[in-house]
Amino acid sequence: MYRIRNDTPLKDIPGPWFASCSPLYRFWYAVCRSNYHHDLTNLHRKYGNIVRIAPNEVSIWDPEVVSEIYSHGDQTYPKCDMYDIALPNGYFNLAVERNIPVHAAGRRAIAKDYSMTATLKNEQYFDAVINDFVTALDKNFAQTGKKCNFTVWSEYFTYDMITDLVFGESFGFCKAARDVEGGLRDLRQMLNLSPFLSYLPWIWPITQMEIIKKSGMKYYARCIQREITKRVDQGNFSGRNDLLQGLFDSRYQDGHALPLGEITNHAYIFILAAPDTASVALRNIIINLCRTPAVYKELMESLVNLNTAKPTWNDLSKIPLLMAVVKETLRLHPPAGFSLPRAVPTGGRTVCDKFLPENTTVGMSAWCVHANKEFWGEDTLEFKPERWMDPTQAYKLERYGMTFGQGSRACLGKNIALVQLVKVTAQILLNFEFGLLNEEKIKEVFLLLVVVDGLDVWFKRRPGGPLDDTVGTEKTPLSTFV
């Protein structure tokens, strides 16, 4: 242990003694305590801008270092070997590719379909899935007086949304009002396993045992392969320019099409990454609105003043507070809880006045970066959407914030996430009054993502809202919500 700790330039970087000797320290906090996002932040409060969290890994929380580690082009730090275990099928994988030029070429080949302009061409399909969600909330909860397990229902919505955008039709969780074929259960099992795979990668062969493979991604692997095979055999029967069709139509700079294995990898990433992050964000939006009645009231008034039951993105963009609520929620509760790990490039780098030799793992967690009071101010942990409505503050937040990552590997689906969150938040507010139940049961769980569990919500139709005009005017007393 003495040699592991001291025979390295990292020996002078502060941090817990055991962390510098063994990766088991990080494993204990990340997996056993399930509170890594806060534990890591507390380490920075104790030790400062740079902390040694494993024998060959450091964490940084100084926002001004973001542009050093997560830059564009050849200057960026490549991803480290932690990513090597994901989807190892031999084809390009946007999420885990470590070669910088290869990643840049692969991302460039598909990026056109993820601009805001391209995203808004599909606005009618966002509206259709949101309508299914609102209808289901009304039928199952607002009209019955039953409490809504919003942890589950937010997942129904976001998985319906991403499958609709990718495959041209949703998998129908909202309409069925249940976990279709146990798909979400299987995905949660895989999510529960993800910290083990990330921090104890040698267990990967165990996950390939047939008894383990019966859970996790097996359901979605089958569904994704089915949809891709259908598209190959039958063509684009819906006629929609969905994301899958975009992948088939994409070309590399030299004109060659994406191999089928690469298209499959992209589809896996869409289904894995987009829905869980968006559903966690939606849960936190509901929590923040319920806990800040003044913001709830002001936002409600702004939406009513639009005088339309189905506002478009253009309509909603005229309400700066709505976008601010979504962005502030994502800032305070970024879905990814781990420090996005990178490898220090050849020759080493000096970061936060400490020399880091090449291949040192270095990362920054959005939870840590956004909690740095010395940079952001004493109120950085408070929910204050108004900070996004000040142009100077908003620029600083966009420039140094890490909600969607930064640089060449920033989240490709950022626009999709923002559009669905803004539009669904508006529709929930316009159609329902709502509040939290059993608030003491709400908890955060670190599973690489920071999952919010135990969120129960009551819904009733909003007097004068769209549902009053089309479904009925009866109201359910709040006392009946159990």
Image (cartoon, rainbow, N blue to C red):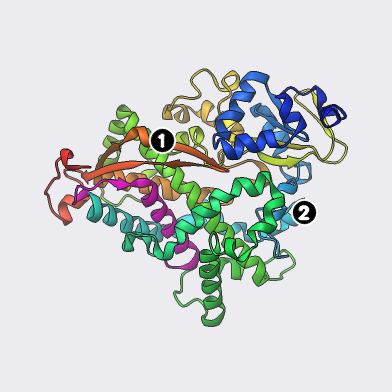
Q: Earlier in the sequence, mark 2 or mark 1?
A: 2
Position of 47 relative to 317 (above/below): above
Task: State whether residue 314 appears in this view.
Answer: no
Q: Dividing the image into 4 quarters, which one contains the N terminus?
A: top right
**Residue 373, numbered circle:** none
Q: Dividing the image into 4 quarters, which one contains the C terminus?
A: top left
Residue 176 % position (x, y): 32, 63
Name the residue rendered at 75%, 45% in the picture.
78
Residue 161 % position (x, y): 43, 58
Within 10 angstroms of label 1, few (less than 14), some, or many (20 or more) residues?
Answer: many
Between 95 and 212, the one lying in front of the other is: 212
Report whether 364 appears left or right of 183.
right
User: What is the chief secondary structure element of the magenta stretch?
Assistant: helix
The residue stretch that appears in magenta: 142-170
Report whether 249 appears left or right of 234.
right
Three-letter amino acid code at the position of disc 1: Val
Mark 2 falls on what kind of element?
helix
Within 10 angstroms of label 2, few (less than 14), some, or many (20 or more) residues?
Answer: few
Report whether 92 appears left or right of 137.
right
Between 154 and 444, the one lying in front of the other is: 444
Between 463 and 252, the one lying in front of the other is: 463
Three-letter amino acid code at the position of disc 2: Pro
Position of 83 relative to 90 (above/below): above
Name the residue rendered at 60%, 49% in the picture.
194
Mark 1 falls on what kind of element?
helix
Residue 398 % position (x, y): 56, 35
Residue topped by disc 1: 325
Residue topped by disc 2: 101
Residue 135 % position (x, y): 27, 56
